[in-house]
Image (spheres, rainbow, N blue to C red):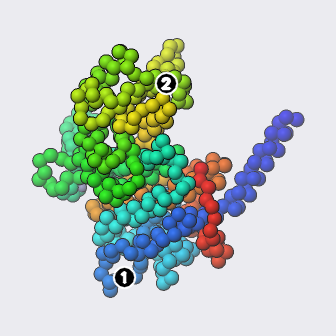
Amino acid sequence: MKKKMKKRCDWNRNSHKREKKKKDRGIVDFAMIQEHFFKNLPDWINEMEDPRHESYVTYTQADFIYMGILKNACSVESMRQMEEKFNEQTCIETLRLLSGDRKLEEMPHYDTLNYYLEKLSPQCLSEIRRKMVCSLLRMKQFYRARLLGKYWRVILDGTGLFYFREKHCENCLCETVKDAEGKERKRYYHKVLEAKLVLGENLVISLGTEFIENETEEVKKQDCEWNAAKRLLGRLKKEYPRPPVCLQGDSLYAAEPMMRICRENRWQYIFTQKDTRQPVVGESYEWIQEGGGTTAVKNIGKEKGTGQYANHVEETAGKEETIHMYEYEYTKKQGEGEKTVRFQWLTNIELTKRNLEEMVEAGRGRWKIENEGFNNQKHGLYRIEHLNSRQKNAMKNHYLLTQIADILMQLYMAWNPLIKEDGQSKKNTSSRLLESFRRQTVTDEDVFYIKRYTTIYLE
Ligand SMILES: [Zn+2]
């Protein structure tokens, strides 16, 4: 009897799922999300400085950029596959609707798109992203993501993108690696540093990109994450002068020059503390702790561990910049015994018994975001390591297109009821989007649905 009941309830759930899938409008919903959050996106794209010679223009810039966005959103790996999959009459009609180009008659060829991306200044796509981010920052629905109700969390994260055996261009970074037999060989590669903006627990978008690369082949010292960070932060302050920011990064950034940049930009910071990076600060904190000068808060965080802090450690450590230090500790079972896990951070936000738990969560959250962020972009939906073009300018633009598509895709996924309620995977969401883009004819009723004003609930 019990078994039967269970089956019926399964059946109910499955039929409920089928009903919902029937209502799933795929590409139409994707367009609706774009219309809701970035109504003017096609105009912004068409207003970019067009790098093409006027007499050769068949496609609008929006045609190209939307095609690139859809390649990413539909999780199509290569440019060739894109051309094959998007070769449908329905695709042309939907692209026409998205880009607003009424004269569009054919999908652009992939080499035409690549040729355009070779010429376009990456600064243009960066500016599109800035406009998108600014629109989101103005929306009240994201305010609750701010740290302590005030600061937007910005996370620095670098990763390697493309690796080559032979020198690929004059900007390549170079390192010596050992192969399986222990033989040394040179490796050429391109790296990128991202500033990510936290808009919600599962909504972390690209705010700024800095390519880590050598200016010329002749440079004495190679470019590195630290120098790229300085350039990136300088640009971010110009692009986003007003929003209150809390910058987060791993222990690499826990050094006074970075803290000075934060102070000059009127930003807060939280950096991971490691004794290898800041030994004197670590020793000073311990000295304060031994003298009973730290404040402890018990039973916080999801492990019900202990938080502890000391403000103004810089006075003891003889540092110029404001440094408050805090830590979080909990024990977990390991085999027969127990293991203590401990994290430490430095910050210039004055610590209190009241804000400590939130500060601990913010510190730990960075690690999770870094782990999932690039991993998802590399092995999940987008394959950012796949080389869509060997030409270095197009390479950058392809990367930026992925970041723009990712903003739309994350909003779409945070809204999508099939993911929220039925746990549909990201990969399946992309496949459904591709199928819908290839097969679905967008009707007048769909267009009305896209354009109408509604409230969008995320997550
Ligand atoms: Zn190169």
Q: Residue at x 43, y 40 (%)?
A: 366
Query: Ligand 1: which quarter?
Result: bottom left
Circle 1 is placed at which residue position?
57
| Crowding near the residue tagged with mark 2, few <14, some 14–19, many ≥20 C-alpha atoms within 10 Å | some
Query: Residue type at mark 1?
Result: Val
Place of residue 173 in the rendered image (x, y in percent of width and height, measured from the top left) = 22, 49
Circle 2 is placed at which residue position?
297
Place of residue 328 in the rendered image (x, y in percent of width and height, measured from the top left) = 45, 26
| Crowding near the residue tagged with mark 1, few <14, some 14–19, many ≥20 C-alpha atoms within 10 Å | few
Q: Nearer the viewer, mark 2 or mark 1?
A: 2
Q: CA distance from mark 2 to mark 1?
A: 65 Å
Q: Residue at x 54, y 75 (%)?
A: 97
Front one among 389 and 349 = 349
Q: Secondary structure at mark 2?
A: strand
The part of the image, by quadrant, that contains residue 60 is: bottom left
Query: Residue type at mark 2?
Result: Val
Which residue ends up furthest to the top in the rendered image? Answer: 336
Q: Secondary structure at mark 1?
A: loop
